[in-house]
Amino acid sequence: MLRPYPRDVLGAIIARMSVERHVYFFGNGRADGSAAMRDILGGKGAGLAEMANLGLPVPPGFTISAKLCIAYVEQGTFPPALRAEVDRHLKHLERVTKKGFGDAKNPLLVSVRSGAAVSMPGMMETILNLGLNDQTVEGLIAGSKNQRFAYDSYRRFVQMYGDVVFDLGKEPFEEELAKAKARRKVKRDIDLPADDLHDLVHDFKTIVKKRTGHPFPDDPQEQLWGAIEAVFKSWNTRRAKDYRQVHGIPDSLGTAVNIVAMVYGNMGDDCGTGVAFTRDCRTGENVLNGDVLTNAQGEDVVSGARTPEPIEKMKRGKLAKVYRELERLATKLETHFKDVQDVEFTFEHGQLYMLQTRRAQRTGMAAVRSAVEMVEEGLITEEEAVQRVPPQDLDQLFHPMVDPRASVTVLAKGLPASPGAATGEVVFDADEAEAMKKKGHDVILVRPETSPEDFHGIVAARAILTARGGMTSHAAVVARGMGKTCVVGAKELDVDPTAGRFRVNGRAVKRGQVITVDGTTGRVILGAAKLVTPKVGKEFDQLMAWADARRRLRVRANADIPADARRAREFGAEGIGLCRTEHMFFEGDRITLMREMIVAADEAGRRKALAKLLPIQRRDFEGLFEVMDGLPVTIRLLDPPLHEFLPHTHAEIAALAKHAKVPAAQLERLIHSLVEANPMLGHRGCRLGITYPEITEMQARAIFEAAGHVAGKGKKVTVEIMIPLVADVRELLNQTEIIRRVAQEVFHREGRAVPYLVGTMIELPRAAVTADEIAKEAEFFSFGTNDLTQTTFGLSRDDAGRFLPFYVEHGLLSDDPFQVLDQAGVGKLVEMAVKLGRGTRRDLKIGICGEHGGEPSSVKFCHRVGMNYVSCSPFRVPIARLAAAQAALEEAGVVSRTKATV
Amino acid sequence: MLRPYPRDVLGAIIARMSVERHVYFFGNGRADGSAAMRDILGGKGAGLAEMANLGLPVPPGFTISAKLCIAYVEQGTFPPALRAEVDRHLKHLERVTKKGFGDAKNPLLVSVRSGAAVSMPGMMETILNLGLNDQTVEGLIAGSKNQRFAYDSYRRFVQMYGDVVFDLGKEPFEEELAKAKARRKVKRDIDLPADDLHDLVHDFKTIVKKRTGHPFPDDPQEQLWGAIEAVFKSWNTRRAKDYRQVHGIPDSLGTAVNIVAMVYGNMGDDCGTGVAFTRDCRTGENVLNGDVLTNAQGEDVVSGARTPEPIEKMKRGKLAKVYRELERLATKLETHFKDVQDVEFTFEHGQLYMLQTRRAQRTGMAAVRSAVEMVEEGLITEEEAVQRVPPQDLDQLFHPMVDPRASVTVLAKGLPASPGAATGEVVFDADEAEAMKKKGHDVILVRPETSPEDFHGIVAARAILTARGGMTSHAAVVARGMGKTCVVGAKELDVDPTAGRFRVNGRAVKRGQVITVDGTTGRVILGAAKLVTPKVGKEFDQLMAWADARRRLRVRANADIPADARRAREFGAEGIGLCRTEHMFFEGDRITLMREMIVAADEAGRRKALAKLLPIQRRDFEGLFEVMDGLPVTIRLLDPPLHEFLPHTHAEIAALAKHAKVPAAQLERLIHSLVEANPMLGHRGCRLGITYPEITEMQARAIFEAAGHVAGKGKKVTVEIMIPLVADVRELLNQTEIIRRVAQEVFHREGRAVPYLVGTMIELPRAAVTADEIAKEAEFFSFGTNDLTQTTFGLSRDDAGRFLPFYVEHGLLSDDPFQVLDQAGVGKLVEMAVKLGRGTRRDLKIGICGEHGGEPSSVKFCHRVGMNYVSCSPFRVPIARLAAAQAALEEAGVVSRTKATV
């Protein structure tokens, strides 16, 4: 069994506890703690303490240290001194509030809330109004002169306590509530009269007694300690543990318990509760915004039972003063924390209280704009701005999105494979997609899954939607490479291309019907949803300039055609790190020539077909070299198994047989014989160039001739030729000899030499562990971490969909290793290869060209192990640039203050 | 480019040469060299020197050092001093032989032969009678008084020189010779009269002039230096280089040149030449044997132009004296070299000369018997006997073989997947094989390739023959495991099961026809070939006893059923290292239950089917535990992808649909959905047990219940449960928790606990590099080097047939990594895992259960990295025992003298 702490460490912790303080008071303009004590007070407690110290109106209360949590979970008891310490603080709270806990005349009620150092779902939620019983409720009525309010508070308390302490769930209580409203024929909770609420309290208590076998506790002390224990216990619920495992949060953190004097937003129309953001979290605009509900308590805002109103509405009318005060406090908090804040507030008869403040979640656009503007405002430094924006969030900046305010009909949800949103008519076939596109239609290609034969359909479509496949399936990878919206693995879809329709949850969508695909969230939406395009402006350019000035890692793009290369440069790519030559062979006539080559009976036949491919391939390379204009271009030689190029339907086979002048039956046999049990581990990569050296020859010739032609026009050309799937240095040697020989021939014939490097992909574990040998021949390494992940894990990304989601969900893997580089396993091989390679060749140029080259944590890893560059799809280049800058700043010890912000 | 030597090292070698001696004389009862100087003199030269030193009748001559070879190959010239040194030795040779090189009256003729330290095909062959020209031939006539002999020698010389020095091949000369025999209407070369031979010399020289553009060299000095250069150059022919690369022979060895005064076996009927073995190389019997040809020169024996006679024939008649002398010398040589010798001899007018002696090749049976008898004779020590027998050769001892003397019609040749030979009627279907077997027929199952569904057919057949697949294909692995004869990848076979026949090279073999499959050589033989069974007797037991006393590594067997386990114990296995539980599910009703489990709609349905499998599986384990009687039994939980168990034909699917009460169409869809792109990297191994924990539960329950029952009968049970395909410790933890929980349940219920270990396969690179983490949970490691090789190389063994043979043939890989563990790559991961694992858990038990566990060099590797045991198929257990003993002796520094033997 895994234990968060070994026994001896635990012993030391417990020993220390007996002398340490466990409870921290705040309120009345001062606090025992501060924002820096997050580890002890948790996020919520630290925020409350800091606000109290700043003199903000915070209801008084105290926080029980998170350090106690683990000991409680392990031992099931509290240190003996705790009870006295809590009592002491409760007494102090009574003095400050001038109320008595359990006092039937003037009762002190409190909220009990959990709060860990890291925001974490799955733990115990809030309990409000704790301290109420049949006696104290009378005091509350007397004090507030509001019977309805008092019983509303009471029934809320019993409901929340039953849900979170007795673990009965919300449903039994909601059912009773619904019955009461039905009886009274009202829609809203708020419309229930006091009597009904009074009865509900009784009904709720009956539910508790029936289900737990014990009466609902009336003693406020018993209520309090039950709640405290429930908070601590909630640290170890299955859901919380799983969440921590998945997100790499240490089990040893623990959660604090916040006990705060109640203030009431449900005492009348001059009362209310709400949330506010110091800037617009969608756009970044520097304007206070948020939602408010009058005559309500906290959970009403989130539960959706009533629709809150925008806080701007408070500006005018009787709440104008409250609004101005909120504005003042929000500015004060942002200036203090130097980041956009997300605050919770309550006002009671016009008196504003701040209940929580924390760093606000925001869109990519808002993150960029607010960071840059805060530098301009002098709030933060350029380095802080660079470190503050999560690189991943930049992905949202370049794609249209479904208007967050639009109301849409979601048909299904798949994996958000490539961001953006697009609307179009559904088609089920690549040819049809192309034909419709030509007629001026916007189309969405919907397939069970895609294969290279669908390539022209992907090109023609506005978006791709598949029922199968994961984040690195064919559709996902190709679409991401083109920056095209894509949702994959939408399992609920039953796609029937033959019938020309897909079914989903009892609904059928036919060819030609309009849908919207939201690649940012994975939603499949019926009809044309309203799309909006984020504006990336000068703030983005400014942030990138600051990042570029600070990063060491170069950033290249994966691009196969000049249009991609051009886009890559627009996004700031400093070269092409991966040009996949096979993608050049799928279009138009090329596939026919390629097939001619494959079905040729002998080398002479293959050479004949290759000779026809040569000028086409040469033109491809010329285009790339011209666009890149001296920046390095890494070209990978043919990689996929040959059968991927072959036709599969009878009609296509017959056509090819006719073209190639071979009997169809013979061709069928050939195609069948090329099918592999495990194509991923089959006859592909350099194994093709070794068994058919004429393919390597043709490709090398096309590269060198193209380089010569472009150089002849006075442009600089920097060529790097990359050999795929090398397992042993002898394979590389075999291919290098061919390439160098062809280079000499071409250079000699054309009277012009072009500088070039020959290197290899490191994408097999054997290449990684023999990298010292391989570096004797390789002038550069490029880690193909997609394949390296597949082989290191023994995991086919095409098949992983059957268990990988289960793994990630159940914490057997922290992340999908095809999205986030597995540093503990794959990364270990990468590090080993870097070390071995540089041991042989000190100046070995090293990069990465797998999908991970555009994933922030992986980019940072690449920086740390000393790579020269990362290469990713053009749209992810800014992400990589920013992550690279953050890595450099982290290395230099510049720690973002964002982390220390509550 | 790879160079054997860097420039500076080469310079040093050349510098040293100017002071070193390059030429070594032998003859007249003394020699400059000895057997210890193999590196300089090569095998042949060292043998000649040693024989001369022993006082054996060796024709005098000298050897040019192999050290010169590399310098010559690199530089194209000889060191200046060499010519004078050779001249000096040639003069000495003239003095000793009392003949003159180029002397027209009394010519000295020599043979020129290459000879490297290691026997190696592809290099230059012998040139005999060098020194002959139109003048010296007259002296030879005069001296021998035998014109026919002289011209026969002359035409042989021109023929051989033209072939090997001018590289014209044998054909043009053989054609002329054939014409001459046709003209004279004789069949044998020996029947051509002197005049015809005289004319042939002229014709041969004309061929040389026509083809090379230069006249045939008449100057003996020019002849000699041409031959010397040709020998050195032959070191770097493509074929020789490839051979070295494949066999790991360093390029830097070089070959020596042996120049030996001619003695003539072709001077008459009291002359002759032959080869002899000091013991019978088929049986090991201590009896001189060999072949002899009278009135012939060396190459006649090997060329097959005349059929030699057994040397026993010499015992009586005029050659009796020569025979007795040969017997005396053979004994002397064997006693001296302490190993069976293979000698070449020539006798000239009754005078015997020894031309070569070397270690004799022998069968496994002969190797064992001669080694053991030599210990008994006091010739060698027990350790030497253990080290002398190549472990691989033991494989021949347990299988019938095709009588080496039988004449057979070979239809095709495939890969010798599992040794032995068997005769039977051809069947093309597993069911038919079973039915025929029941009727008492011996059958050979012939398939394009096999799958688990053919299992019962493999069980029923005497031998398996497949057209596709490699040494580790399904048929190969299963057959080897059962010790059943098997030939796979017989590519020339066009197998048509539907038509009930296979075609091969224009011939058709139909169902029911008899063939013989020779799994030792890979031959497919028409009809019933005569089979013989090697006798393994007390010598084998004796050798194994010596080996067992010296090894540290334990040897276990891979066995799935009690019959295999029993056989394994007979072969000396000390436990079961791998019991593949899935093999238990393919037979009879079990596959139906397994299918029922897979097609179940939910967990409840799966549990129902599993409950029916439980008692069956429990009985399997009981059987194993009883046979193994306390020896450890390692049981691997379910490993293969589920779809392997499912039916594929429409009829089978319909049957299953009926049985499982699901619509056939739905079942088809399910089966289709289970098909994986790369099943090797798919939903298998522990991924099954994690997503379907009820499978692991059932297997664990069956194991513990079985163990309890057998223990209840008073037998000891040692259980090791092994989790397959673990990539991360969390997977292992998940499965371990289930197993330990079930163990507690069963032990508690039955009131009896059985000791057990839970460990893991290390068969993925990620497991190897995170072995420190995994060892926290694993109580033992077992390296699954088949899968580890696949993933480390990114190489599917099912698909590798398309390029792996090309790789091995062209030196891109030294060996098939599925047969011989790749120590440089896979081995590096194994070493790393051993080190990391033991770093966490010092006493971690470590073994190997891949195919490599029975391959000698891999077994030795396992010893060196410190494993506790190897596990292999039962028939290979003796091989592993012997290899393990050799590894221990090597480690202890006991070097076999065999290696130093010429």
Image (spheres, coloured by chain):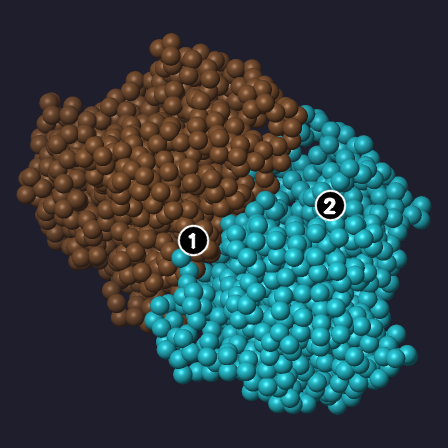
Chain colours: A brown, B cyan
Disc 2 target residue: B466
The amino acid at mark 2 is: Thr
As shown in the figure, which amino acid type bears the numbered disc 1?
A: Leu
Label 1 resides on the chain identified as: A
Q: What residue sits 77% from the left and 82% below the top?
A: B351
Residue at left offset 8%, top offset 37%: A328
Residue B472 in the image: above or below residue A276: below
Identify the element where label 1 is drawn. Answer: helix
- The subunit letter for the residue under badge 2 reads B
Most distant residue in the right direction: B439
**Residue A683 x, y percent position in the rendering:** 53, 43
Q: Quadrant of residue A379?
A: top left
Is any atom of residue A766 visible in this view?
yes
Cβ atoms at labels 2 and 1 below 8 Å apart: no
Mark 1 lies on residue? A733
Mark 2 is surrounded, within 10 Å at the Cα level, by few (under 14), some (14 to 19) or many (20 or more) other residues, namely many
* Number of numbered labels in the structure image: 2
Say if A565 sits above or below B64 in the image: above
